[in-house]
Image: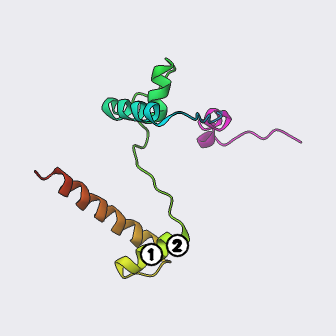
Amino acid sequence: MSQRKLPQKWQSSVRAAKAVQVAFDMDETLQYQIRREALDNGLSPSDQIRHILTLPTADKPKRPRLTVSLSPEDYFYLAERYGLQPEQQLEIKHRVMDELLAYSQQMLKP
């Protein structure tokens, strides 16, 4: 099999593609401590672990975000809740974001 040269725009992803994700089973107290420290330090839990291990991290997150996995049943439920069709996933995503923003604003009120 011949080796093909990767397009320039993909070459920066080669190192990330070779990285191996490692999962650790920890008790809840340790998980909470690491997550809390990460939050206090403005880091992801993964970057906090890298910091603890004195491994290099990016200066700032590439895409700071929160994620949630939605099943087809979740989309069905949310579509019904928002008066949409389950296939309208982008609009559902917008409504979820609006709801989360409203939630955060409500939590900030005294």
Tag of residue 77: 1
Q: Which residues are magenta?
A: 1-18
Residue 99 in sight from this viewpoint = yes
Q: Residues within 10 Å of mark 1 (few under 14, many from 20)?
A: some
Does the magenta run of residues contain 3?
A: yes
Return the residue nearer the eye: 66 or 17. Answer: 66
Q: State the image coordinates of residue 94 (x, y, percent, origin top left).
A: 36, 66
Q: State the image coordinates of residue 73 (x, y, percent, origin top left).
A: 52, 73
Please, what secondary structure does the residue beneath circle 2 have?
helix
Return the residue nearer the eye: 108 or 25. Answer: 25
From the image, tell me which residue sits under label 2.
Answer: 73
Q: Residue at x 48, y 78 (%)?
A: 86
Q: Is residue 95 above or below residue 22?
A: below
Please, what secondary structure does the residue beneath circle 1 have?
helix
Q: Residue at x 62, y 39 (%)?
A: 8
Tag 1 near tag 2, CB within 8 Å:
yes
- Residue at the limit of the structure toward the top, as seen here: 54
Number of on-image labels: 2
Tag of residue 2: none
